[in-house]
Image: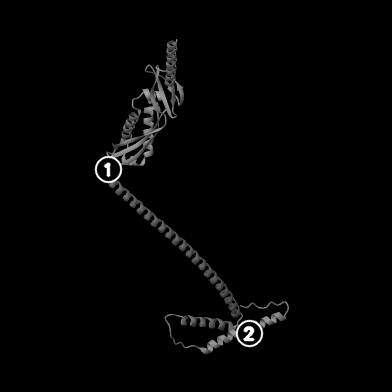
């Protein structure tokens, strides 16, 4: 009886141990960011997501453990010949992420090496179709073209290429020196153009200022000429009135008026002769009596005019004579 009990106990223990082993083999825990492919008798059946999963022990097994997070691949440096036959060294980085674990596991072998080689090949293709100047100035366009080509090529592998960045483009040393000389010449050219443009603007502004000054000066001369003409006109009017009064006096037989005219012309002629710049000293016989007589005539005219004015004011209805 005891031997039968011992055999039964061993059987129970064996069953429990087998159950525990089957339980551990059938339970799979997948970490976050990972996915496992399950194969049944060597054939893919499903993909295990992050968390606790159950499989059939001894029938199912884990085929591949794939990292579903975005990964970074360094593209090694390589030489590229541009369209204008310049040799440059180029390297970069590739950012990619697995979207379909089954395709990544069974559509391509060594997915990282495949992505890397595909990227390097397309770098040579894209950059080889461009000139060196375009290569150095259009990195964004290069990155965009590489991303489009590589992403389309890796789509059947269940991979999404999110970014491709060119890190460094290194031309040869002699080419760098030539580019530096070209850049210096271009900067000198721009500086010369800017200086010439500044001088041109200065000349234009200076000419504009001289033009405005000439216009204002001409306007000033025109205004002065207008004022001089107006003054001469007023003076001529006054002279005409004076001449008319003297003529009227002469017409009435007033000898003093004649003396006034002669004395005025005589004195004006002496003044002009004395103001002549070529004559500093002169001798002229002057008829003092005639001049004094003419001055006396002027005084007589003034007295007669004042007497007539007083008489006219004393007599109502009579207008006083006009005097100048």
For this rendering, which residue is in front, 243 or 210?
210
Answer yes or no: is residue 100 visible: no
Residue at position x 58%, y 85% from top? 297
Q: Position of residue 181 (x, y in %)?
A: 29, 49
Is disc 2 in contact with disc 1, using a CB cutoff of under 8 Å?
no
Figure quadrant of residue 66: top left
Q: Give 271 or 205, whichever is nearer the viewer.
A: 205
In depth, the one of 209 and 16 nearer the eye is 16
**Circle 1 — which element?**
loop
- x and y percent of residue 321 in the render? 65, 78
Query: Taking 122 as reference, is 266 above or below it?
Result: below
**Whether residue 28 can be seen here:** yes
Q: Secondary structure at mark 2?
A: helix
- Seen from the viewer's position, the closer of residues 171 and 221 is 171
In the rendered image, which quarter contains the N terminus?
top left
Label 2, label 1: how far apart the Cα atoms are? 117 Å
Name the residue at the right extreme. Answer: 316
**Of circles 2 and 1, which is in front?**
1
Task: Relative to 144, say whether 284 is above or below.
Answer: below
Q: On the rendered structure, is 119 left or right of 247?
A: left
* Furthest-left residue in this view: 174
- Label 1 belongs to which residue? 172
Q: Is residue 255 left or right of residue 222?
A: right
Residue 277 lies, in percent from the top left, at 43, 80
Disc on the earlier residue, 2 or 1: 1
- Mark 2 residue crowding within 10 angstroms, few (<14) / some (14–19) / many (20+): few
Position of the C terminus, as image quadrant, is: bottom right
In this figure, which residue is indicated by the disc labeled 2?
303
Color scheme of the displayed model: one colour
Furthest-front residue in this view? 2
Q: Is residue 19 above or below residue 134?
A: above
Residue at image location 60% in from the left, 85% down from the top: 299
């Amino acid at each position: 009886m005891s031997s039968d009990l011992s055999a039964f106990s061993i059987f129970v223990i064996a069953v429990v141990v087998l159950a525990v082993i089957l339980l551990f083999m059938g339970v799979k825990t997948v970490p976050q960011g990972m996915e496992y492919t399950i194969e049944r008798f060597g054939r893919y059946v499903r993909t295990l997501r992050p968390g606790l999963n159950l499989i059939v022990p001894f029938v199912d097994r884990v085929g591949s453990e794939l990292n579903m997070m975005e990964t970074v691949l360094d593209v090694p440096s390589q030489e590229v010949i541009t369209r204008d036959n310049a040799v440059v060294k180029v390297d970069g980085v590739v950012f990619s992420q697995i979207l379909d674990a089954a395709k990544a596991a069974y559509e391509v072998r060594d997915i990282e090496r495949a992505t890397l080689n595909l990227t390097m090949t397309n770098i040579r293709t894209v950059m080889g179709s461009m000139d060196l100047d375009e290569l150095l100035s259009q990195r964004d366009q290069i990155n965009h073209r590489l991303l489009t080509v590589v992403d389309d090529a890796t789509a059947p592998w269940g991979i999404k290429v999110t970014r491709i960045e060119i890190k460094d483009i290194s031309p040869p040393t002699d080419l760098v020196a030539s580019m530096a000389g070209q850049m210096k010449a271009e900067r000198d050219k721009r500086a010369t153009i800017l200086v010439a443009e500044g001088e041109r603007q200065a000349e234009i502004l200076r000419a504009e200022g001289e033009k405005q000054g000439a216009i204002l000066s001409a306007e000033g001369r025109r205004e002065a000429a207008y004022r001089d003409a107006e003054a001469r006109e007023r003076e001529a009017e006054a002279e005409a009135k004076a001449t008319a009064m003297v003529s009227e006096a002469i017409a009435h037989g007033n000898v003093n008026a004649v003396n006034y005219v002669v004395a005025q012309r005589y004195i004006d002629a002496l003044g002009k002769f004395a103001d002549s710049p070529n004559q500093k000293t002169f001798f002229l016989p002057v008829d003092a009596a005639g001049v004094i007589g003419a001055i006396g005539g002027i005084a007589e005219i003034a007295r007669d005019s004042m007497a007539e004015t007083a008489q006219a004011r004393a007599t109502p209805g009579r207008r006083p004579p006009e005097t100048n």
